[in-house]
Image (cartoon, rainbow, N blue to C red):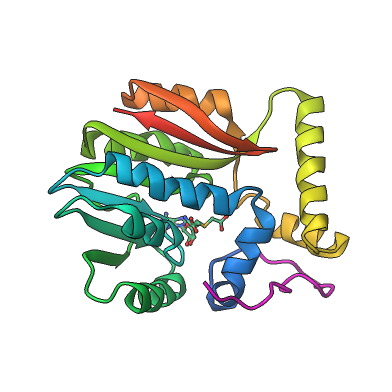
Amino acid sequence: MQSAKDSLYASPLGQISAFTFDETVVKVFPDMIQRSVPGYSTIISAIGLLAARFATENSVCYDLGCSLGAATLAMRQHITTRNCRIVAVDCSSAMIEQCRRNLSVAFDGADIEVLCADIRDIAISNASVVVVNFTLQFIPLADRQAFLATIYRGLLPGGILILSEKLAFDDARQQTLQNDMHHLFKKAQGYSELEISQKRSALENVLIPETLAAHQQRLKAAGFASAEVWFQYFNFASMIALK
Ligand code: GEK
């Protein structure tokens, strides 16, 4: 996906407002996420491979918090099963408009439904694959359990949830180290100290990371038979939960 370079936080901002997924973010989003989330493109590619393995005939694959549709594109490219629809959902209208444009260029007429909605409100059913790629972290803590329970109920037996999140750590030294390494990752991607610290302030209280143990407990409580990390790069991990 083509993208302008992210320089949203490059100049000093008098007041830093809470981060939102608006039009200015949409314009730079592919560059922003690629340079901010270690392992992002590896995870997107693997989502395509996992979807190809788990998608079943006459079922639905969901991409919840789809942004510009990167995971949807990867799934559509890899799924060969017949009659397998993809439903991509995001609550940012700016994201959804650009997502629709991206998907219509790549897959005009392919069986993809793109919805502008809150992922806490949609019905999920007949699902073989559900992707929640770096989106649960933006849902209020109090709503996370009910949301995962809805996903669990909507999955078919043997279905998969791919859940990727920024992680927090109980151990203080580990927390500091992983944060520092993420900081160094961003510097190596060309972000300045100012950009990194202003973005961090914008995400404060907007992106709430949790520990791996908290995620695994919640997935278990939702009913999932098992939940394992298949990928981790510093404080960013992707889990596979099986129904
Ligand atoms: C990717 N998965 O490229 N309902 C719907 N959408 C939401 C909600 C909500 N309640 N809360 C946040 N979002 C994508 C990347 S980005 C991750 C996901 C990041 C949406 C929000 O509008 C944004 O598009 C997305 O979740 C999070 O694989 O930017 O760190």
Name the foreground residue: 182 vs 82.
82
Name the foreground residue: 5 vs 45.
45
How far across and down, in percent of the image, does residue 189 sit? 77, 60
What residue span does the magenta drawing correspond to? 1-17
* Residue 226 position (above or below residue 209): above
How far across and down, in percent of the image, does residue 203 sit? 66, 55
Toward the right, the furthest residue is 193
Look at the image and tell me whether residue 118 can be seen.
Answer: no
Query: Seen in the image, is 81 located left or right of residue 206?
Result: left
How far across and down, in percent of the image, does residue 141 sit? 50, 39
* Residue 228 position (above or below residue 61): above
Query: Seen in the image, is 9 located left or right of residue 145?
Result: right
How far across and down, in percent of the image, does residue 233 sit? 66, 39
Badge count: 0
On whether residue 14 falls in the magenta region, the answer is yes
**Which image quarter holds the C terminus?**
top left
Query: Seen in the image, is 46 located left or right of residue 221?
Result: right
Name the foreground residue: 153 vs 228.
228
Q: Residue at x 31, y 40 (%)?
A: 53
